Image (cartoon, rainbow, N blue to C red):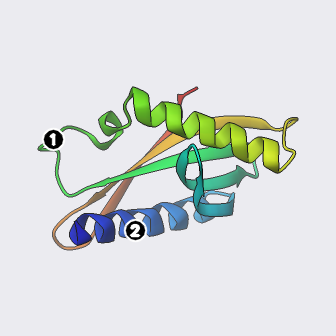
Amino acid sequence: MYYKQETGELGEDEAEKYLVKNNYEIIERNFKCIFGEIDIIAKDLYRKEMVFIEVKTRNNELYGVPAEAVDFYKKKHIIRSAKYFIHVNELENEYVRMDVIEVYINKNGVCKINHIEQAFC
């Protein structure tokens, strides 16, 4: 279990670097509420959108591509958590979207990122 958590944190770190490099402002990481957790909440400074991001990290595709792990129930938790975040922070007038970032880490520690914008709504 510790290995999976460590891999997940590494993937989130890489996703954050990627986002900052691509004109996003990180608002919060690992936002938790009664409805679930959101890995990264960011502001797309170019499009002026709030982005709720699920990060999935894999070393291989033995169990499918990372985005496939964001199933119906996971999406439901993310959407509810995002609605809660929007309400609590009075962001009802913001444009929002839900993205998935796939992080592939090879055995040499080299990362490849696949950013899926508007992955679900």
* Alpha-carbon span between mark 1 and mark 2: 19 Å
The residue at the point 31 percent across, 34 percent down is 68
Residue 57 vertical placement versus 2 (above, below): above
Badge 2 marks a residue whose secondary structure is: helix
Q: Of the residues under marks 1 and 2, which one precedes in the sequence? A: 2
The residue at the point 48 percent across, 60 percent down is 15
Badge 1 marks a residue whose secondary structure is: loop
Mark 2 — residue? Answer: 9
Task: Classify the position of the N terminus by image quarter.
Answer: bottom left
On the image, which quarter does residue 94 sit in?
A: top right
Q: Position of residue 44 (x, y in %)?
A: 71, 49
Crowdedness of circle 2 by 10 Å Cα count: few (<14), some, many (20+)? Answer: some
Residue 50 vertical placement versus 16 (above, below): above
Identity of the amino acid at label 2? Glu
Direction from residue 13 to residue 64 in the image, left or right? left
In the displayed image of the protein, which residue is found farthest to the left?
A: 62
Identity of the amino acid at label 1? Tyr
Mark 1 — residue? Answer: 63
- Answer yes or no: is residue 20 visible: yes
Residue 121 vertical placement versus 20 (above, below): above
